[in-house]
Amino acid sequence: MSSPTPKGSSSSQSNTPTHRHPNHSAPSMLERALSSRRVNSHGEDDGDGSDGGGDESKTKKQQHILFRVTNRASNYLSRMAGSGSSYLPCVVIAMFIFLAFSFLFTSRGFVCISSTYSPVSRSGFFGFDGLESDFGALGVPWCRSKHGKTVEWTSKDLLKGLEEFVPIYETRPIKNNLYGMGFDHSFGLWFIARWLKPDLMIESGAFKGHSTWVLRQAMPDTPIISLSPRHPEKYLKKGPAYVDGNCTYYAGKDFVDFGSVDWPKVMKKHGIADLNRVLIFFDDHQNELKRIEQALKAGFRHLVFEDNYDTGTGDHYSLRQICDQFYIRGGGHSCFKDSDEARIRSRRKKFWEKAVDIEELCGPGEAWWGVRGYMRDNFNHSNKPISYAQHFQNSRFIESILDIYWELPPVAGPSLTHQTRYDPARASSPIVEDGRYGLFKRLGLANLDNSVFNGYTQMVYLQISEQ
């Protein structure tokens, strides 16, 4: 299995265990300049997610050429009026036409902001050619790896993969995978599995079997182990589902939780001597720190987490939440209600369904980490308070065992996919940027229903090893 290499650090938590490192004190909650929160996009960027270029104000716009022409015409008109020219009526008419065209080309951003959610007013408010620069505006805190490695694949590899995957996705047995993976994460899992070419694939959480099907499309002959409380075949009674013929199911009455499996015995049964040749896929909504500890103990190195929820959202403690730290570029938050971040979040809440404003982000005592100072687990059936010091130490632990961290970028920008859920300001730049409709169409993405693009939650691939 080839060894890719993403970005920095994060961790999930067993029931409540934390990892303490001496003399690591939590940084103070200082107001952070939002201009420093942007990070580079995927692929060929440098490992820690920081870009060398300075950030420019998003409100600064270049003057349109017609705006400059009308300014000059206005000056000329003033001079003619002063000289009493007989051509003045003609010039006035010409000036009116110039002004009309100038307004037409420069007033695109002027819309009425309604208190109700509206995708149409959203795109009008931000402007379609401004959507790309909108990505990452509120920070994209990637976990930091031990040695600053990054993945081997590039944005060109992702584009080539998209071209191959779209026709495959159109043959999926479960067309409406409600509450399951959408297109973005289906592509991400398929791409990672196909790139790594593991000898064994293990999934924790199968639902109706869509992820099993995706893994099978990536590796047609590779064995799969599936752990799921309910067997996918049970869903066949009510509608489409997928059961794989080359898969060992620990499901239904035979279900065993990932942390309770006798992995040495299972690996021996499948003839796996090198655990570096195994890929683990988690879509079980469990505390990701806990799952990482269990995988590390078993000796597994290549992990994918489907739901890598952002801070303040989700039903379990995630890597994105763990690595949302002040010392990481794009991380940390202020609960000050008059801050720039608070104003921007309040505005964005009107346009993106999953955007979180300061009132939702911050709990009692200005606790913003995790979900309002809580560490969720097991579909939010467990919800325990966690101190900032514990949260900070969790991120330091993750850094100590993390070789690679890479968040799947969105497949395409929202002006193309018309997705209305995730906030681009907390996501990396998409594989297909806004405005590139020709490429979007050529890849076959325009043929897909808009609903399949609404499930993006920062799927993450990581490679771990002992300290």
Image: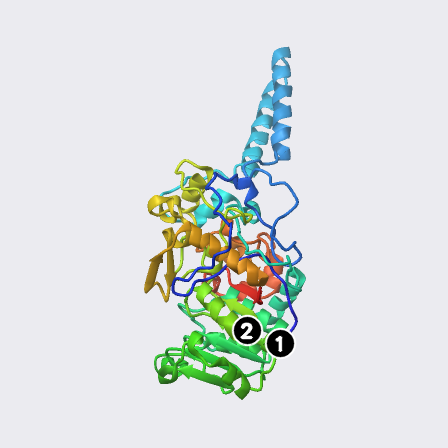
Q: Quadrant of residue 339?
A: top left
Q: Badge 2 is on which residue?
A: 300
Q: Is residue 43 left or right of residue 454?
A: right
- Residue 384's tag is none
Residue 418 in view here: no
Q: Is residue 439 left or right of residue 254?
A: right
Q: Is residue 83 left or right of residue 376?
A: right
Eyeballing the image, is 251 above or below 78? below
Could you give the CA–CA distance between mark 1 and mark 2, rounded to whole angstroms? 15 Å
Q: Position of residue 122 (x, y in %)?
A: 45, 47
Q: Badge 1 is on which residue?
A: 197
Amino acid identity at mark 2: Phe
Q: Position of residue 342 (x, y in %)?
A: 42, 41
Q: Position of residue 255 (x, y in %)?
A: 39, 81
Q: Position of residue 304 (x, y in %)?
A: 52, 68
- As drawn, the residue found furthest toward the top would be 83
Q: Quadrant of the N terminus?
A: bottom right
> How busy is the neighbourhood of tag 2: few (under 14 within 10 Å), some, or many (20 plus)?
many
> How busy is the neighbourhood of tag 1: few (under 14 within 10 Å), some, or many (20 plus)?
some
* Circle 2: element type: loop
